[in-house]
Amino acid sequence: MEHEEQGLPSGFSQRLLLQRILPWLRPQAKIFVLCLSLLLIGSGLRILGPIILQTAIDGYIRQGDFPGLLALLGGYICLILLGFGANYYELILLETAGQRIIAGIKNKAFSHLLNLDLPYFDQTSTGKLVSRIENDANAMKVLFTSVLTQILGNFVIVLGMFAVMGYKYDFQLALYVVGLCPLILLAAIGFNRFMAPRLMAVRKNVADVNGYVTEMIQGMVTIQMFGQEANVLKELEKRSLKKYKQDRAITILFNSFFNFLFLIQSIGIVMVLWLGGQQVRNGVLTIGSLILFMNFIHQFFVPIMFLSAQFNEFQKGIAGAARLFELLDEPRLYPDPVQTLALPTPERCQIRFENVWFRYSDESDWVLKDLSFECPSGEHWAIVGPTGSGKTTLINLLLRFYLPQKGRILINGVDLKELDPGTWRRQVGLVLQDVVMFPGSVYENLVLGESDLPLAEIQPLLAEIGLDAVVQRLPEGYQTHLLENASNLSSGEKQLLSFGRALLRKPALLILDEATSHIDPQTERQMKNALHTLLEGRTALMIAHRLSTIQSADRILVLQYGTLVESGNHQELLAQDGVYAGLNALQKV
C-alpha cells in the first residue's frame, strides 16, 4: 500500500496528510495569496535578468553604446533590488503565517492531550509526547513556509525559462535542454520513495533520544544518588550512535544524489556549448543568446536541484505531520457519556462498589477482584493493605481515571460511567503523597484558576490547618513565586499547600493519600485538630500506611492481592487478629 511504501504510520498517505493540512491553511489564505503574488514577481525578475544580459551584449556592447549600457545596468540593479524586496517580504509573511498555523496546531494537539485518559500516558513517555508537539510540529511548518511555496516558485521559473528559450531564441536548443528533465524527475521520484521510510525512522529516533534525555533529567536526583551517571551516559551514547548512523547514511545518499544532478547539469552545459557554438558559427545564434542559454541552463537546473533538495524537507514535514495527526487521532479509551446524568444531592457523597474487577491490560493480572462495599455519606473510611494490594487503583477508579472491566461504581446511586468526569472531579478534594505544584505564586497554586476566591475569604480556612502561618513566613507571603518543582518549599510545606488546595474546593468527598506523611509531628497534630471540624458532614477516604493516622476512622477496609479481606473499625479489626492486626503489630516493633 502507498503509506507502507512511504514509511508512514498505518492509515496515512501523503495525499491524505496534505488534505488534512489544507484546512489549517485557509485562515491564512490572504497572506498566502499575497505571498504567491510576490513569488511570481520574484520569479519573473529572475527570468528577466539573463534577457537583460543578452540585450547588453548583443545590443549596447556590440554597438559601443556605453551610455545606453549604463542606463540598462542601472535598470538591472533596480530589478535586483526589487527582487530582493519581494523575496524578503514573502519570507516574512510566510513565517508569520507559519507560526500562526503551528501555534494553532500545537494548541489543538495539547488540548487533545489534556483530554486523553491516563492509560495512554502509562504507555507513552513524556519525552516522546514533547517531541511530537514541539519537534514534529516545527518539522511540519516547513511544508507551508518554504517547501510548497518554493516548489511552486521554482516550477514557475522552469516553465518561464523554457518559454523564453524556445519562443524567443532557439526552440530546438531549448528542447535539448528540457529533454534532460524527465531523467531528473524520474530520479527525484525514485529517490523520494526510497528516502521516505528512512526519514520517518530518523524522526522516530529523534523522539527516542529526546524522550530519554527528558526522562533522565526528571530522574536526576535518583541518578546522582545511586551513581548511575556513567550508565545513563552509556545508554544515551548507544541511542545517539544509532541516530548518528542513520543521519550519516541519509547525508551520504543525499550528497550522492546531488552529485548525480550536478553531472546532469554539466552534461547540459556541454551540450549547449557544442550545439550553440555551431549555431553561433553558422550565424543562427548570437553570442549574447548563447550566454543567455548558458545563464538559463544554470538557473534552469538550480530550481530542479532545489526541488529535489526540498524532498528531504518535504518528507520531514510529512513525517512530522503524520506523527502529529497520529496523536490527534488517538481515541479516548473512556469517552464521556453521550448523555450525562446530574449527580443527586451533590453536597453529599455516598460511594458503592458492586462486584468491581479491574486490570490494567488484557495480559496483566487482576488488580481488584470482585470488590464490593458501601460507604455512607458523611463517614470517614480508611483503606489499608500491603504494597500492591490495590489501594491506589481503587482511588483511580473512584476518580474515573480508569473504568472497571466488570461491576460498577455508584455515586449517590448513579453509575460513575454516566457522570461527566470534569463535573464529578470538581466534587472531590484530593491530597496525594507526591505533590505537584505549577508555575506561579502560592496563591495561584491554591485557587487553581478560581478567581472568585479572594485571599481575605480563604485565609481563615487556611489558618485552621496551619497553612496561613507557614505561608506568611515566605518572603512574599501568598505572592511568593514558586520555583521549578516548588523547590523553594519543603516537602511538608508543599503537602500543606496541597491540603489547602483540596479544602478550598469545598468537596463532597475528600481523598487523602498518605496526607500527613511529609508533615512534622507538631503540624500533624495541628492538622488533626482541624480535620475534625473540616471533615464534618463530608465523606472521606484515607489511604494510609501508618495505621496510627487512621485509628479514628469510622471503618477500615483491608485489601490484600486486590481482594477485600477484612472490614471494621480499629478495635474490631484488632480483635479479629487477622491481616490488619498483623500490620499493626509490625509497625509497633
Image (tube, grey):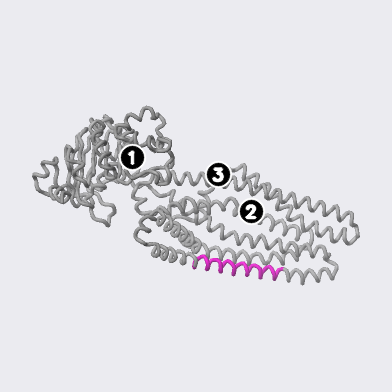
Residue at the right extreme, as displayed: 64
The residue stretch that appears in magenta:
245-268
Label for residue 498?
A: 1
* Circle nearer the viewer, 1 or 2: 1
Q: Earlier in the sequence, mark 2 or mark 3?
A: 3
Q: Secondary structure at mark 1?
A: helix
Specify few, some or many for label 1: CA neighbours under 10 Å numbering under 14, 14-19, or 20 or more.
many
Residue 167, position as x, y percentages in the image = 77, 58
The type of residue carrying mark 1 is Ser
Specify the quadrant of the image occupied by residue 165.
bottom right
Q: Nearer the viewer, residue 220 or 284?
A: 220
Work out whether 83 lies above or below 505.
below
State left or right for residue 486 relative to residue 389: right
Image point (84%, 61%), residue name = 57
Q: CA–CA distance between discs 3 and 1?
A: 37 Å
Q: Which residue is mark 3?
A: 100
Q: Is residue 90 left or right of residue 228?
A: right
Q: Which residue is mark 2?
A: 152
In the visual, does 118 lie left or right of 85?
left
Q: Nearer the viewer, mark 3 or mark 1?
A: 1
Circle nearer the N terminus (1, 2)? 2
